Image (cartoon, coloured by chain):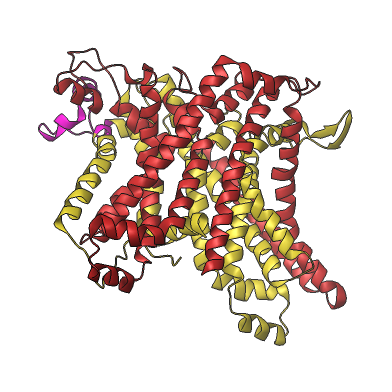
Amino acid sequence: MSDFIATNVPKFTSLFTAMAAFFIILAVIFVVAGFVNGKIARPIALVVFLAPALLLLLAGLVIPTGRTIFFSFMNPNSDGFVGLENYAWIATDPGVRTVLFNTALWTIVTPLFTTALGLYLAVMLDRMRGESIPKSLIFMPMAISFVGASIIFKFMYEYRDPGDSQIGLLSAIVQAIGFGPSNWLLVKPLNTLLLMVVFIWTQTGFAMVILSAAIKGVPTDVLEASALDGATGWKLFRGVTFPMVRTTFVVVLATMVVASLKLFDIVRTMTGGNFGTSVLANEMYSQIFVQFDAGKGSALAVMLFLSVTPIFIYNIRSLKRERSSK
Amino acid sequence: MSSRGLSQGNPAKKLFASKWATTIVWFITLLWFIPSLSLLVTSFRSKDDVFNTGWWTAFGNPNFTLDSYRSVFFGDNGGGVSDGVLPYFVNSIVITLPATIFPVVIATMAAYALAWIRFKGSDTVFYIIFALQIVPLQMALVPLLKLFTGGASIGSFQFFPALGIAGDFAGIWLPHTMFSMPLAIYLLHNFVSSLPREIMEAAVVDGANHFRIFRSIVLPLSIPGIASFAIFQFLWVWNDLLVALTFSSGLDTVAPINAKIASLVGQYGSSWETLTAGAFVTISVPLIVFFSLQKYFVRGLLAGSVK
């Protein structure tokens, strides 16, 4: 116990020191700059308010992005140019091909499944009474980290030899209906699909909540008018509800695509990228921190950047279009 | 889009309420709850029970214990965490609070400047910041780590000294603060720019300068917007793995609990009673935040993704 205090009290000391320093510096600057009068008062206020954020952005995102692009043309130690070698490696290496294939699979399967299920749930919620408890419970996994969710599902996928008493729910169910369970996370390509389940479990509630809000925004009189015209169920959904929430649907879908592209935690925690499950972000991490090859790692980061960009632009444009049409 | 709270349903009327829909939703809800339940139940079972029987048998044969939590909190020799996870829990708190508060303050200031201290090109600056959301943080990891450990140089000319904060809490606060800026400024700008103009103008007429306006008008009126972003950022930092792994340099002295638990999965993959208890401790904080501040949580998410 005394060890615990000895090692942890200093942590809180640094916490409080940092916070106190931050606010004291800020207060001093505010007081001093507040005394400035006349013509330079405005520029000074502007600098005080804006400069910290701009400096952080410059040092933390703008310059590093440039340097990563630069490193992607260099050797593992970033001290000599190798031309396009790292990109040639991405294009030709069979291991990387698996990684790219998995990433493509992730970005197609998970967003579609998650968003479609989220929409289905949102529609069903709109047609039921007492929706708040189901909504909370389905949304709850969103608060759980990918690491926590990965542990939960790794336990669900736990495997014992066929015939033994199974402690993983999946294995137990499979055995109960008369099949031999497999060591799930070693079986390609099933293991990648099982990792996707973790993503779907945490993100479906998010899609549901956002789409649910959009569905509630559909004017009741429009629905009533169509219902009077005889539209019911599926027809009503396809003809009235879906067109009115289409933009939200696409935005959620695109958000999920970006999240799948950047996915790292689930693969890292569940398989470490082994057994043919690696994805772009995980491979990048391995290249940099396991192989110590900053060149290949940076080239993979650039690939990630390039694949996120068009989706992001599309997202902004569709939102802009919707806003201007309203 | 209006930002509704999660629990606000549509009390007015349910146009097409059906028993069928109710049944389906409750079925999926149950399905969705099973994984969390398995974690919770397993964490309260004894080592032998967890090893020998499925967690669902605990319902027919209840036999619960706090052993796993005892070993997770205070450490033991068998569970895999010799010193317990409490030090990492402390690390998480020490990392998360500043990594939430610093971005909130700095971004609110920037949002105020861009919205209310107009200058030529302020729109351009705002759009550039907005566009920076596009950059995956993976793009910044290596250069930032190099900056922290070796400074920055062109050829042999060192134009920026090594910060010497790698493996220090500051070395984790700073990247989190940097990476949060585009989203934070964007969200808070939406909020701050919609504050009523009359109030601002009245304050100027009363002779208040920007610093006074910021402190006594902007901050208090922006609390809902700030709360939404702060909760989002808090959960993001608490649940983060990549930044933690990269910038804690593998040091136990600063590694947050999420990263520690992730590494335990690899090392002690089969002592599920400890892992589940550890995981539950990790996710308890986000869950408390989620259930107590659901309204702001949803608002932050909605604003972050759909606006």
The residue sitting at 27% across, 57% down in the picture is A235
B10 to B137, vertically: above or below = below
Q: Nearer the viewer, residue A320 or B194?
A: A320
The residue sitting at 66% across, 86% down in the picture is B202
The residue sitting at 33% across, 56% down in the picture is A238
The quarter of the picture where residue A280 lies is: top right
Q: Is residue B50 magenta?
A: yes
Tell me, by letter, which chain the rendering colours yellow: B
The quarter of the picture where residue A216 lies is: bottom left
Relative image position of residue A18 (x, y in whole percent):
64, 50
Residue A252 visible to an observer of this rendering: yes
Relative image position of residue B23 (x, y in whole percent):
16, 51
B120 to B255, vertically: above or below = below
The quarter of the picture where residue A48 lies is: bottom right
Start-end of magenta stretch: B42-67
Q: Quadrant of the N terminus of chain A?
A: top left
Instruction: Say which colour chain A has.
Output: red
